[in-house]
Amino acid sequence: MMNDIALISAGVAAVGLLIAYMLYQQVNKVKIDNEKVADITDEIQKGAMAFLFAEYKVLAIFCIIVGGLLLFLNDWEIATTVAFFAGALTSVAAGFSGMRAATSANGRTAMAAKSEGQSGALAVSYNGGAVMGLSVGGLGLLGISLIAFWLGAGETNADGSLNVISAAAGFGMGASSIALFARVGGGIYTKAADVGADLVGKVEAGIPEDDPRNPAVIADNVGDNVGDCAGMAADLFETYAVTIVATMVLSSIFFVDISFCKSVTFLSLSEISEGISICFLISKFPPN
């Protein structure tokens, strides 16, 4: 029964990721016909992605070290380590998807505002944000569902006891590790770029804030995307993943009633699946 629930949840998550991709393609259909806007959009996107690649290279080393320690501390049992890497990788994917969608939607929102007014700009920006939201929810549910299926969440052992899936906590730990550095690192870069741009522009050159004549404004806008999109996506993913995993793990450890434990595990996956399904419907009706 629980295996079916885990697979159904994974299917719902896959549909969510497909819809996120469709929304991303819909955002990209908006043409940027202004050369200056196109250049600025491209520079911001290149800078943001370059930051993510540089940050994740360092995080990869950190994750490999922590994964090795988890493997050693768990007497070479791979379950917790695999869950840790799964959580880290899905968190990275959520950050990348959010960043890519946001930086693609920036200039296109301006173009939509020019050609279609406020409603057009709101629709483009809404779809850009929905990509990150559905990616966070879809990747989190997909990863946790597959881990739960692999570990046999909610199943009973040969002696009739409930299968404890404490190794699934590694998934939350992996997500938390990425979120910690992405949020803090992105925030530091954001403030450094913001202060640097203001010092150069306002103090030294005597020009207004965010003036296009100030090259540091590009770094400032890159920082806004890094901190408020990729960092926020990883942070939300961590909270989302840890909450679900904690419900499943703690119920399998502390509750004596096996049927009740199975119900809690079922509820944690089914409620998230229902939430993503509602998001499907909402994403089809952007505000005007």
Image (spheres, helix red, strand yellow):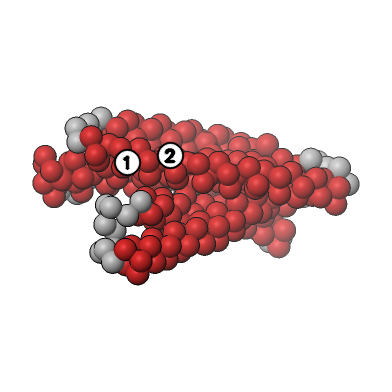
In the image, residue 276 sits, relative to residue 204, either above or below, namely above
Q: Nearer the viewer, residue 52 or 247?
A: 52
Is 265 situated left or right of 72 in this image?
Answer: left
Estimate the spatial distance between the alpha carbons at disc 1 and disc 2, rounded to whole Å.
9 Å
Q: Which mark is residue 53?
A: none
Q: Which quarter of the figure is the N terminus placed in?
A: top right
In the image, residue 260 sits, relative to residue 139, either above or below, namely below
Q: Nearer the viewer, residue 230 or 89?
A: 230
Q: Which residue is mark 1?
A: 41
Q: Nearer the viewer, residue 269 or 120?
A: 120
User: Which residue corresponds to the image point at 11% horizontal and 39% vertical from the top-left?
Assistant: 115
Q: Helix or strand or loop: what does disc 1 sit on?
A: helix
Q: Residue furthest bottom?
A: 203
Residue 41 appears in which quarter of the rendering? top left
Q: Residues within 10 Å of mark 1 (few under 14, many from 20)?
A: many
Q: Nearer the viewer, residue 29 or 158?
A: 29
User: Which residue corresponds to the image point at 77% horizontal and 47% vertical from the top-left?
Assistant: 65
Q: Position of residue 133 (x, y in %)?
A: 40, 47
Q: Which mark is residue 46?
A: 2
Q: What is the count of numbered marks? A: 2
Q: Does label 1 or label 2 sit earlier along the sequence?
A: 1
Q: Position of residue 204 (x, y in %)?
A: 35, 66
